[in-house]
């Protein structure tokens, strides 16, 4: 049995998904995995928190 990659939406190359809606798909002792309901990407929930922090720091003006 071989796995096939999921097809990506055509606008995926234009704008990266910000994963506004996710659902939990798996839990382990020390990890939780979520799936984005928009782009169907699966990743560890801690990565979602990291993405959120990165977005906020990029949008804030730099202090001198």
Image (tube, grey):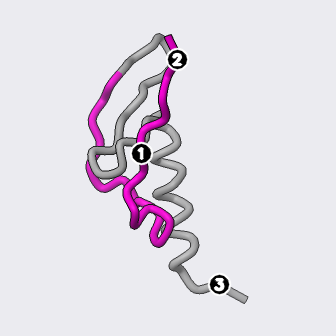
- Looking at marks 3 and 2 on the same chain, the residue that comes earlier in the sequence is marked by 2
Q: Quadrant of the C terminus?
A: bottom right
Which of 64 and 15 lies nearest the eye of the viewer? 15
Region in magenta = 1-25
For residue 18: magenta? yes
Relative placement, left or right, of 43 versus 10 is right
Label 2: few (<14), some (14–19) or many (≥20) C-alpha neighbours in 10 Å = few
The relative height of residue 46 versus residue 27 in the rendered view (above or below) is below
- Looking at marks 2 and 1 on the same chain, the residue that comes earlier in the sequence is marked by 2
Tell me the residue at 37%/56% (across/down).
Answer: 9
- CB under 8 Å between discs 2 and 1: no
Numbered disc 2: secondary structure? loop
Pointer 2 residue = 2
Give the dominant element type of the magenta stretch: helix, strand or loop. loop
Q: Residue 24 carries which label?
A: none
Q: Residue 7 carries which label?
A: 1
Report x, y in % for residue 33: 42, 28
Q: How far apart are marks 1 and 3 (CA)?
A: 38 Å
- Looking at marks 1 and 3 on the same chain, the residue that comes earlier in the sequence is marked by 1
Pointer 3 residue = 62
Which of 45 and 12 lies nearest the eye of the viewer? 12
Tell me the residue at 43%/35% (across/down).
Answer: 42
Tell me the residue at 37%/33% (across/down).
Answer: 34
Relative placement, left or right, of 63 versus 26 is right
């Amino acid at each position: 049995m071989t796995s096939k990659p999921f097809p990506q939406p055509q606008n995926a190359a234009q704008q990266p998904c910000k994963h506004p809606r996710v659902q939990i798909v798996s839990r382990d002792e020390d990890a939780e995995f979520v799936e984005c309901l928009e782009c169907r990407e699966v990743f560890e929930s801690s990565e979602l928190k990291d993405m959120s922090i990165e977005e906020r720091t990029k949008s804030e003006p730099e202090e001198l």
